[in-house]
Image (cartoon, coloured by chain):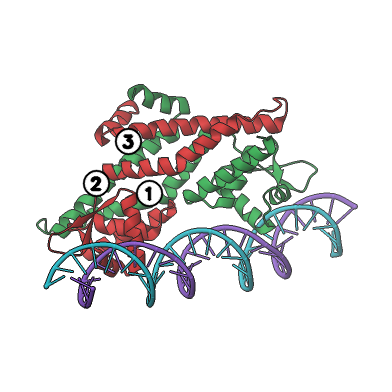
Chain colours: A green, B red, C purple, D cyan
Amino acid sequence: MELAEAKQRFIEAWGKLGSEWGINRTMAQVHALLLISPEALTTEQVMEQLQISRGNANMTLRDLINWGLIEKQHRSGERKEYFFAEKDVWTIARQVAKERKRRELEPVLKLLTQLQEVEGDAQDPDYSTFKKSVTDINKLAGNVDKTLETMLKAEENWFFGSIFKLFK
Amino acid sequence: MELAEAKQRFIEAWGKLGSEWGINRTMAQVHALLLISPEALTTEQVMEQLQISRGNANMTLRDLINWGLIEKQHRSGERKEYFFAEKDVWTIARQVAKERKRRELEPVLKLLTQLQEVEGDAQDPDYSTFKKSVTDINKLAGNVDKTLETMLKAEENWFFGSIFKLFK
DNA sequence: AGTATATTTCAATAAATATTGAAAGTTTGA
DNA sequence: TCAAACTTTCAATATTTATTGAAATATACT
């Protein structure tokens, strides 16, 4: 396989994986493109390489900045803005985990805790089944939350290394 | 909060969370409904409770069966089929992890391994940046894969218990 | 075999999401 | 202060994804 084709495939696969996990396909593709670019790219270059409009490129680049996955670069003597991706994959993983935890896990945890407090008749199967499911999910979500918290603070080698030492 | 409202909120939240993570909202809602139902439900009941069409209910219930999250129940003397959800939350989590690993993680891992084999000039920044990103992601994905593998075999208490013992 | 009951399928339709592109806004330097 | 270079916005449009509902199929009982 040629490098050019390999790049293309990587970008497509990243886009597909993203969309399967609720992340806009174009956003994942732009991220992939910047990840494999040694140099920072301009909006124009992103537009051309991925064949997307200026508006789309602009919004997507802003979103990626909000996710903390890319940064702007200013070059003295130039008007244009350049964009480059954080290249450390563990840092990227932590960043994504951090944002999704904040945007999606935490609101659900909050609701689950409220729902757990709903009172009712312990003899009522409707109530007791509801209560048990909510409590169990809350407990699991709490464990996931704590694990992510740990992940956010940890180095990759330590995180996985420690897990595998145990699970051998 | 009343039980009826709490149930509604739970179903909605589960649907929202699902859609944020690439799972059809209706599928997540049907799952939530069955999760908090002490009894198995018929297609009719699911249709009525969630206000969805017969076709949608049927397809969604089939999908949930394919995900291994619910089962059919036959009652002697009755023609209708009843559906009920696996209630153990850790089993559910493992089931979801197993399916997503198989459907989404494994294909990507396979491609990454191929892309890692692409040859090129180590002096070429385009090549070396590509190579490094692909290799790093492959390594991380491999670690995730191994962790999920462990999770699939483990009991909840052991899994999280072991992690937290380390990370204290 | 006939029929009532239940399930499945899938083309048509609707809803949700993403993208475009042109106009408005901003910045910089002459 | 002007205008070229660049960025942002957002209503209109396109695309993707989900849902409907009625016809086709299957099942079980008499």
Residue B27 visible in the snapshot: yes
**Where A73 falls versus B24 (above or below)?**
above
Inter-mark Cα distance, 2 to 1: 16 Å
Instruction: Name the residue rendered at 41%, 51% in the picture.
Output: A104
Instruction: Name the residue rendered at 33%, 56% in the picture.
Output: B62
Marks 3/1 same chain: no
Residue to which mark 2 is pinned: A136
Chain that bears disc 2: A
Give the crowd class for mark 3: few <14, some 14-19, many >=20 residues within 10 Å.
Answer: some
Chain that bears disc 1: A
Indicate the amino acid at tag 2.
Asp
**Where A10 falls versus B45 (above or below)?**
above
Quarter of the figure that contains the N terminus of chain B: bottom left
Disc nearer the start of the sequence (2/1): 1
Estimate the x, y position of residue B134 in percent, counting from the top left: 58, 33
**Where A125 falls versus A137 (above or below)?**
below
Q: In the depicted view, which residue is nearer to us: B90 or A119?
A: B90
Quarter of the figure that contains the C terminus of chain B: top left
Residue B13 visible in the snapshot: no
Estimate the x, y position of residue B125 in percent, counting from the top left: 71, 30
Indicate the secondary structure of the residue bearing disc 2: helix
Residue to which mark 1 is pinned: A106
